[in-house]
Image (spheres, rainbow, N blue to C red):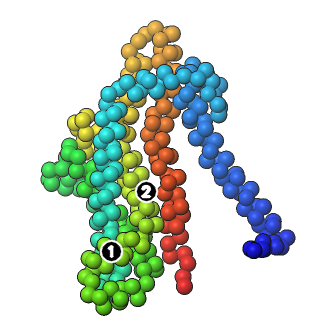
Amino acid sequence: MATKMRLSPSDRVFYLVDYLLLLFCGVVVLLPLLNVFAQSLSDPQSVISGRVKFWPRHFTLSTFDLILKNKNIIIGYVNTLFYASVGTVINLIITVMCAYPLSRQEFVGRNVFMVIFAFTMMFSGGMIPTYIIIKNLGLLDTRWVMILPSGMAVWNMILARTFFQNTIPKELYESAELDGASDIRVLISMVLPLSGPILAVLTLFYAVSTHWNAYFDAMMYLRSQRLFNIQLILRNAMANIEALLHQTGDLGQIVQNLALMEASKYVIIVISMLPVLIIYPFVQKYFIKGIMIGAIKG
């Protein structure tokens, strides 16, 4: 039977402080989320009056109904899912294709390539040259403009390279070579099945940071509303509500529209972040493993 290790007084103090600190961090993160959800489910008049804290007052879904009646919301969700899914697959393919050879000591010139990749992390052409290049490539106002320009993040590639170096044993490569396996066969049949944690982390990074929140890229490069992602459509919906606020001269109507605009802000936040909150718990354990890459040496 397993015996429980006896903790020293100093260890008990350490664990107590650790738990209190984690509890404090959890409260700091959780309370704003509860406030946002409570505001989104409350009557607009209660929201604008500042009476809503962490529990809805005069529960209503009318603001959600108003926002979701906009048919462009569905179009935006479909577009965003397309950008996030297809874009993330392309990101993973390019990242692994770069990281795997750079992790092999047999690859001649890998340090030179790493310097070139690292250089792009510190220096870039800037917004205007990037826009000109994208325009000359004919990518403006196409779906691919939301996918191809962000094909790979160098930092993510370095994470994958470090994982391959520290996790995949050299003996595995040697045994595969003795069996006559090619590099591509080794990558597909042996390396990738052992790389679940880093692939899950990269998927989360690319899907959320690169594609789901790509508001500025959509605003810069897209003109057709049928191509807008959810972030840009929600921003336009918010702008329409603000325009409605200034179209009437009736004081009562102005107050009502102002309350609706304030409640809509919270509804838009919930709509945009809810999918991420649903997905994250399923990849959390891989995320924790991924952020520890390179921390343990043996």
Looking at the image, residue 226 sits to the left or right of residue 255; the answer is left
| 12, 48: nearer the viewer | 12
Residue matched to label 2: 204
Looking at the image, residue 289 sits to the left or right of residue 169; the answer is right
Residue 213, position as x, y percentages in the image: 39, 47
Which residue is found at the position 76% from the left and 64% from the top?
A: 15
Which residue is found at the position 74% from the left and 74% from the top?
A: 2
- Label 1 environment density (alpha carbons within 10 Å; few <14, some 14–19, many ≥20): few
Residue type for callout 2: Leu
User: Relative to residue 4, is residue 51 depicted above or below?
Assistant: above
Q: In which quarter of the view is residue 19 placed?
A: bottom right
Residue matched to label 1: 189
Residue 293, position as x, y percentages in the image: 50, 72
Residue type for callout 1: Ser
Secondary structure of the residue carrying tag 2 is helix
Looking at the image, residue 92 sits to the left or right of residue 208; the answer is left
Secondary structure of the residue carrying tag 1 is helix
Q: In which quarter of the view is residue 6 placed?
A: bottom right
Circle 1 or circle 2, nearest the eye: 1
- For marks 1 and 2, give the CA distance: 23 Å
| 143, 172: nearer the viewer | 172
Q: Quadrant of the N terminus?
A: bottom right
Which residue is found at the position 78% from the left and 61% from the top?
A: 16
User: Relative to residue 8, is residue 31 depicted above or below?
Assistant: above
- Outermost residue toward the right in this view: 9
